Image (cartoon, coloured by chain):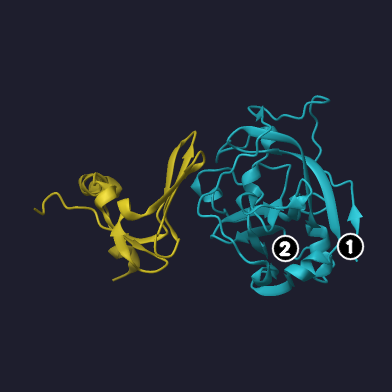
Amino acid sequence: MTTTTRGFSGRRRARPEGNRVPPGQFVTDDFPVLSAGPTPRTPLEKWTLALQDGGSLAGRWTWEEFQSLPQTEITVDIHCVTKWSKLGTKWKGVTIDHLIEAAGLDEPPEPYLMAYCDGGYTTNLPVEDLIGGKGMVATHYDGEPLEPEHGGPARLLVPHLYFWKSAKWVRRLRFMEHDEPGFWESLGYHIYGDPWREQRYDGD
Amino acid sequence: MSAEGERSTLDGNAAGGLLREVFAFDATVAPTTCVGCGRTRPMAELMLYAIELGAILRCPSCDQPVVRIGRTSRGLWLDLRGATTVVAADPATP
């Protein structure tokens, strides 16, 4: 059965009422595409999503199995480190909470997580920024299946952090004991990436 | 002899001349070996993906990122872990 829930919300921070645009950002109606490589096109019949606890497999879902997990719809603002923000974007997917539950885990086994993607992209996140409805694996944008250019068939969505953390073409999520830098984080970008604190680069 | 005794008394400053020779090379012609597939080609023959965040040079044989450059407010970050070796032209060799 597919259930649809609402009420997914990012980390709330003290900021001027009604101000939805973080410092240094401008609002765009476009949806710019930034990719550090060719666009992978994994056929759905070959697609799987794996959840790993360190080196051991905690859960793995085929596309069909993934669709049968509880589906959540959200409307959120997104903020790219290249300074564009897009307001009111609509997504559908499976929250990390539901993935953890579907893997039979009572709670996240480690405090950090690395996302691995087709094409070799990676990004690191604290688990607390993914649970409690703060992160999902999204498969639909604006009511349609997510296009490959935007990370389809499935991308990570963590809207309260800069959008490089919302890794496109995600295939594997690995819990880890210690934080490690991912693809851009190891090239001078901030390890955490909070747009409200303008954490663009290492040292910000 | 103890490990302590084998330690060099010189620091990297003493390699300044050599480092200047190595890092003054024209990277586009430098033979560069991909860590993914082991193939060697000049950097000019890698595939460039340049976006505002930085530039990624990928191996045309296996898509491995070989040279990665992050463009930040604090400089250009170079990551060569995708290259096993980069051969700089030796100015002393004709």
Residue at x-position 29% and y-position 60%: B41
Residue B76 screen position, x and y as percent: 43, 40
Which chain is tinted cyan? Answer: A
Inter-mark Cα distance, 2 to 1: 28 Å
What residue is disc 2 on? Answer: A110
Residue reaching furthest to the left: B94
Which chain is tinted yellow? Answer: B
In the image, which disc is placed on residue A31?
none
Q: Nearer the viewer, residue B56 or B69?
A: B56
Residue A120 screen position, x and y as percent: 54, 60
Within 10 Å of disc 1 (Cα), the crowding (few <14, some 14-19, many 20+) is few
Q: Quadrant of residue A199?
A: top right
**Image: B19 above or below B75:** below
Residue at x-position 89% and y-position 62%: A2
Residue reaching furthest to the front: A144
**Image: A192 above or below A109:** above
Q: Secondary structure at mark 1?
A: loop
What residue is disc 1 on? Answer: A2
